[in-house]
Amino acid sequence: MYRWIILFAAFAGWMIGEEVADTSTAHFWKGGSLDIYEENDKLNKQDRNYTQGIRISFTTADRPMPGWVDKIPYIDRRDYTINLSLFLGQNIYTPGEIKIPDLTVNDQPYAGWLYGGFAVNRRNGGQLDRIEFSGGIVGPDSFAGPTQSEWHRLWGIELPKGWDHQLKNEPTLNINYQRKWKLRDIQFSKKARQSESKGLEAQLLPNAGWAIGNVHTNLNAGSTIRFGYNLPDDFGAGIIGDTDTTSRQSKLGMAKPSWSFYLFGGGDGRLVAQNIFLDGNTFTNSHSVDKERFVADLRFGFALAWKRFSFSFTQVVRTREFKEQDVQHKFGSFNIGYRF
């Protein structure tokens, strides 16, 4: 089962090695960025639904790619830069009542997802396109049950007792696409407007995209507004569920302020055709619930960066994802980043 993750990692490594011969790019790590995302609902005194997620990703500096990348049906313009992201993650889902061993028929199924993959990011100053390919495993081989039990044991929390009812093992394949724009860049400092320096700024960042696969199939659209000092040359803070969580510019030799800080808020809506964590296994019978066809997120938080380090926190309020769900779900998303 784990061959899916190994396959995608090996393929991404091969793609990096297929650079054009005349490039002068430095070592693979130089100019790249490492990001760690941790998401949990315990901050909001919940322990249910999407209860835990972790993702580690690395985004290279801008670099030439093999010719076939230009054939991917999205941006194909000469003035765009391009880089590659590699990622590995795990998501955990549980019902609201985890203290009983019985199946909770009308609640979120127990499920885990262990996955890996790569993404190609192509952008200019005002637009980003990201297409992401992931493969992994849903079911016991995702190690979600043991992971949650060990964390509960470590923190002295009562152990979950219903993992015998989780979704069965199923290999996963998904393709996710996201486009983001910078429609407004308002500078409040007269000095900043008259020079290339930065200062107090505001930006509007709309987004739209789609996902297709046996994990998620949906259409989405949303927007974010951010306001702060020395806004970074990226497309905003992301969460694990986004396809643009590692979309920051990572160009060798790019001048940038030594620090930045901003506040942000926005929303994202999804028309859902498939969600394996609610619909259950694709090819075998399993626990499932009746999903909602439209799901929306309200998001707000802050982000800061100093020299090579960055940090962001996003509070997410999500509408009901299935008809029997009695309350909205809330969770916090933390990101720590380091640029090489």
Image (spheres, helix red, strand yellow):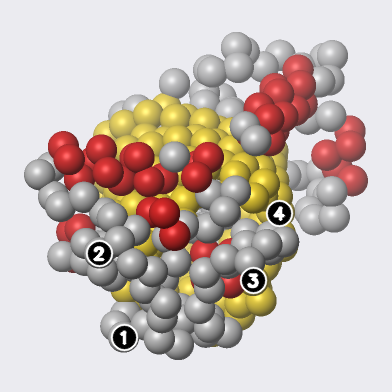
Residue for badge 1: 326
Within the image, what quadrant is residue 188 found in? bottom left
Residue type pointed to by label 3: Gln
Q: Which is in the foreground here, disc 1 or disc 2?
A: 2
Percent coordinates x, y for residue 138 in the rendering? 56, 50
Q: Are marks 4 and 1 in contact (CB under 8 Å)?
A: no
Residue at left offset 28%, top offset 55%: 161
Vertical order, 164 against 319 (above or below): above
Identify the element where label 3 is drawn.
strand
Residue 274: image tag: 3
Residue for badge 4: 175
Precedes in sequence: disc 4 or disc 1: 4
Q: Are marks 3 and 4 in contact (CB under 8 Å)?
A: no
Identify the element where label 1 is drawn.
loop
Precedes in sequence: disc 3 or disc 4: 4
Residue for badge 2: 100
Report how far apart the C-alphas of labels 4 and 2 lie in the structure: 36 Å
Identify the element where label 4 is drawn.
strand
Within the image, what quadrant is residue 18 found in? top right
Report how far apart the C-alphas of labels 1 and 2 lie in the structure: 19 Å
Residue at left offset 37%, top offset 29%: 338
Precedes in sequence: disc 1 or disc 2: 2
